[in-house]
Image: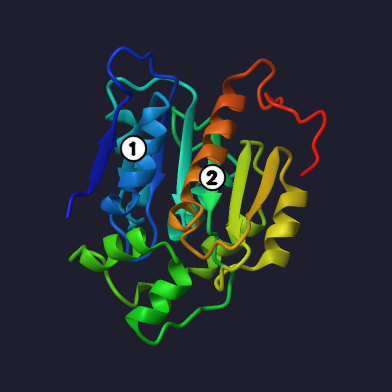
Amino acid sequence: MTSERDFTAPPGLRTRGTVVVVAGRGETPDSYARFGARLAADAYRVRVLSAPSSEFAAALGAAVSGIADRVGPLVLVGADTGAVALGALVARPQRWARWWPDAVVLAGLPGHDTHRVLDWDEELDARTHCPVHRGVLTDDPSVRPGALAAAVPADLLDAVYGSTADVPHLLLVGDADPLADRAALGRLAKALPAVRLSVVRGAHHDVLNDLSHRSVAAHVVMFLEALRGTPPLAPIVETETSSW
C-alpha cells in the first residue's frame, strides 16, 4: 500500500489550484485514484493521503508542505474519518500551521452512532453501489473489511459538529448514506458562516465514489472554480429559464 498518490494537470495546462484528499476508514489512497485523476484532468494538482492516524496533523502538514509545485487555492477534501479529522482541525480556535486551507470539502461525515457491518457484502452496500468502485475495494489487499464498524472518536465528532470555522465548507452527503446524521449536518450548515450542504440523490456513504461519482466530481470542480472567482464563491453559472 502506498501512503499517498499524486495526480498532476495535463502537460501544457497551467495548474489552477491544489487539492489534498484524506481517505476514510478502511480505505487507501488507491480508493481515490478515479477522483484524483478526474480533478487533475481539470488542471488541479491532487495529492491523496491515507486515513488519519494519531499523528494526523503532522502528517497532513508534511504532505502539504512537501508539494513543491503547490499553487493556491489550497483545498482539503476528506471522506468519512478523513472528513472528521479535517473538520476538527479547521474548527480549532487558532490556526495550527503557517499554511492554511482556503476551503474544505467534507464528504460522508458520519454521525455519532456507530454503524456496525456484519459482513463484507453489507459493508459494500453501505459504502457504494458503483460496481467499479466495489471492485476497487474488493481487489485492493490493503483495504480493511469491517473498518466501518470502528467507532469514530466522540471528541472529534463534537468538534466538527460544533464548528463555526470561517473557512468555506462544502458538505457532501448521500441521501442513502446509512452512517449520516442529516439533522446534525443541517445544524452544522446553519452554524458555519460560509457553507454549502449538497445532498446527492441515491448516493451512499462513499459519496465521492458512488454511482454518481462523475456528477459529484463535477460539483467539487464547480466549488473549486467558484473559490477562484472574483468575488470568491459567487455562482459562475446560473439558470435563468428551465423546464426541468
**In this rendering, would 186 be left or right of 107?**
right
The residue type indicated by label 2 comes to Ser
- Residue at the disc numbered 2: 215
Mark positioned earlier in the residue sequence (1 or 2): 1
**Considering only vertical position in the picture, is 223 above or below 9?**
below
**In this rendering, would 231 be left or right of 139?**
right
Q: Can residue 14 be seen in this view?
A: yes
Report if the CB atoms under discs 1 and 2 are less than 8 Å apart.
no
Across and down, in percent, residue 155 comes to: 54, 65
Q: What crowding class fits label 2: few (fewer than 14 Cα within 10 Å), some (14-19), or many (20 or more)?
A: few
**Considering only vertical position in the picture, is 236 above or below 159?**
above
Q: CA separation, marks 1 and 2?
A: 14 Å
- Residue at the disc numbered 1: 37
Q: Can residue 59 be seen in this view?
A: no
**In this rendering, would 176 be left or right of 71?**
right
Which quarter of the rendered picture does the C terminus lie within? top right
Mark 1, secondary structure of its residue? helix
Q: Which label number is shown at residue 55? A: none
Which quarter of the rendered picture does the N terminus lie within? bottom left
- Looking at this rendering, what residue extends furthest in the front direction? 243
User: Where is residue 150, by image quadrant?
Assistant: bottom left
Of residue 70 and residue 162, the one placed in the foreground of this image is 70
**Considering only vertical position in the picture, is 139 above or below 67?**
below
Please tell me whether mark 1 or mark 2 is closer to you in this view.
2
- Looking at this rendering, what residue extends furthest in the bottom direction? 118
**In this rendering, would 72 be left or right of 2?**
right
Seen at 31% across and 12% down, the residue is 12
Seen at 56% across and 63% down, the residue is 157
Across and down, in percent, residue 235 comes to: 71, 27
